Amino acid sequence: MTTPPIIDLQQLASDIKLWGKELGFQQIGIADVDLGEHEQHLHNWLANQYHGEMDYMQRHGTKRSHPSELVPGTLRVITARMDYLPEDPHSIKILQQKDKAYISRYALGRDYHKLIRKRLTKLAKQIEAVIGPFGHRAFVDSAPVLEKALAEKSGLGWIGKHSLLLNRHAGSWFFLGELFVDLPLPVDTPVSNHCGSCQSCIDKCPTGAIVSPFQVDSRKCISYLTIELKGPIPEPLRTPMGNRVFGCDDCQLACPWNRFAKTTTEDDFNPRHQLDNQDLLALFLWDEQTFLANTEGSAIRRIGYERWLRNLAVGLGNAPYSAEIISGLTTKQTGDSALVNEHIDWAIKQQTSKQP
């Protein structure tokens, strides 16, 4: 019988962090699987119905807060972060130009899911090359995983009042990924919370979705309204949406810690099809084939053409008066989608009310 090799777990943990950086991750951490405190927070959030239509947040029983139930045998979670902020993102300028479309910075380039999962898989193979076969599974926002809680436990940062992970040296403009492993690796120490008395994110939220520190009511959140919500956007929330047509970054733009954010080193995360500087009307006039072609490999495609038009119609309704906008809205008014038509009708009324 072959005796299994003795593994120096401390050295392995150090090597994993080095390999992770070589693969393009800015930071690697290691957490245990005890998420009791975060589990209670999740239960309270769900009890308040803050998840809206995101039923998947309450499915799968306790697997979300018990990693070893999701992947039996899991002892540790290797967490990874990767910066995505594009260089010269024009964020504030685009928000101020009301005839332009604001798309959340994370969605301007290629979809991050596959890229990060591939890198995590490569990391697992490097570990395997050293210690032999071991149990593992990679996740990137693709399963019931409390990724921010695990990242916080592993020392990658702290969860801010806007519910996003914050890092003293990188702000919050980064993606997270996880590698569940059955190795008893030494764990990292969490960092303390450095939000202090600041509540810039709460004050700057356009729809008041951050109802209290660390509590976000998704039903009011523009990211939820433009991406997760399948039906009509509630009328009282349409005007506060402004020109935000896919996601919202206001809480990140307001956060003082993001002055330390680093621009991405990944070409795939840089803007495609000039989506960081497009007119609302130009995007609205895309036909479905153009939409599919220009969002291939993008996170934007997940909402589909119908909700794309819905969101843009709201943006056009909020834009300064333009006869060209009214004309453009009218060209889509005869479509088959009752959802789109309702938002076009609203947008035309908004535009007409601003006519000089």
Image (cartoon, grey):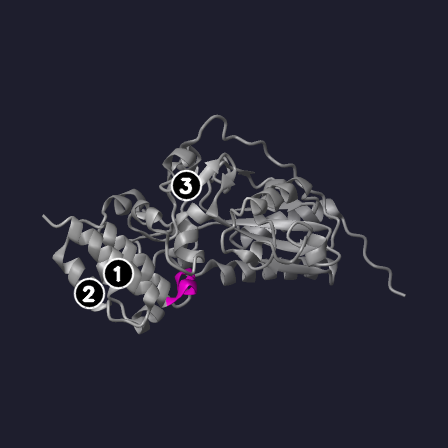
Nearer the N terminus, badge 2 or badge 3? Answer: 3
- Answer with the quarter of the image where residue 199 lies: top left
Query: What range is drawn magenta here?
Result: 298-304
Whether residue 56 is in magenta: the answer is no
Q: Residue at x 47, y 58 (%)?
A: 112
Kind of residue sitting beneath label 1: Ile
Q: CA distance from mark 2 to mark 3?
A: 35 Å
Identify residue for label 1. 344
Element type at marker 3?
helix
Identify residue for label 2. 330
- Answer with the quarter of the image where residue 72 lies: bottom right
Q: Residue furthest left?
A: 356
Q: Are marks 1 and 3 in contact (CB under 8 Å)?
A: no
Identify residue for label 3. 252
Does residue 196 appear left or right of residue 316 in this picture?
right
Asked if residue 274 can be seen in this view, the reply is no
Kind of residue sitting beneath label 3: Gln
Q: Nearer the viewer, residue 83 or 13?
A: 83
Nearer the N terminus, badge 1 or badge 3? Answer: 3
Give the image location of residue 200, x and y in percent. 40, 32
Q: Are marks 1 and 2 in contact (CB under 8 Å)?
A: yes
